[in-house]
Image (cartoon, grey):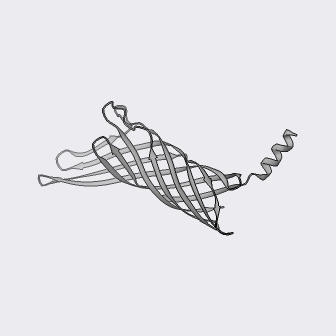
Amino acid sequence: MALVAAMFVAGNVQAQSTLYATYAPETFVASSNSTNYQGFSIGFSQNIDLYKGLGVAAGAQFRMNTRSATQTLWGFTGKTKETQILVDVPILFNYKIAVNRDLAIVPFVGPMPSLALTGTTKGVDPIFGETSSNWYGDNSNRNRFNLYVVLGADVKYSNFNLFGGYRFGLLDLDKSDNYTLKANGFFVGLGYTF
């Protein structure tokens, strides 16, 4: 009987795969200030229908944060460029609210573990020349791992997805005792479901 029940459940489980791209800027909030980065991602998710509109979508996305800045001091101009590359694994619980046969609104919420692969700051200074620093080098205080809570909604029309939301970083990204650094940001994206 257990085998028959397992086959019945497996036969009724429907999975949908989605490819998507997002605009996902990020703000690093420190103890004393905040810094804004432009962000973009591409990803893939698989949504499994669990029960009467309730589902869970799991996948992976490749995300990049960038920032360029120019500063002039005493007539000298310096330039800084920062780049961070991450891999995120969103696990989003969702509920499909069907408006009609083709249109549905799908709110979602869930955790998103994130691992920073690289992070660099490169500068050009008229006095000191070119400089480069690795965010995650041996002498760095930065943590590579973060855990976000993600919430938002997806508007599905046929196979197309228009979605948006916000991600809240839960972990302190700096190992220093008297300094905190957290990352937050909104996102909007387009996707196609197969």
**167 to the left or right of 31:** right
Specify the farthest residue to the top: 177
- Percent coordinates x, y for residue 18 in the rendering: 61, 58
> Which residue occupies the foreground of this view, 61 or 150?
150
Residue drawn at the location 54% of the way across and 58% of the way down: 153
The count of marks equals 0
Specify the farthest residue to the left: 74
Q: Is residue 64 visible?
A: yes
- Percent coordinates x, y for residue 31 in the rendering: 30, 40
Q: Is residue 72 above or below residue 137?
A: below
To which quarter of the image does residue 14 belong?
A: bottom right
Residue drawn at the location 12% of the way across and 55% of the way down: 75
Q: Is residue 35 above or below residue 31?
A: below
To which quarter of the image does residue 99 belong?
A: bottom right
**181 to the left or right of 12:** left
Q: Quadrant of the C terminus?
A: bottom right
- Percent coordinates x, y for residue 141 in the rendering: 35, 34
- Percent coordinates x, y for residue 17 in the rendering: 65, 56
> Which residue occupies the foreground of this view, 35 or 73?
35
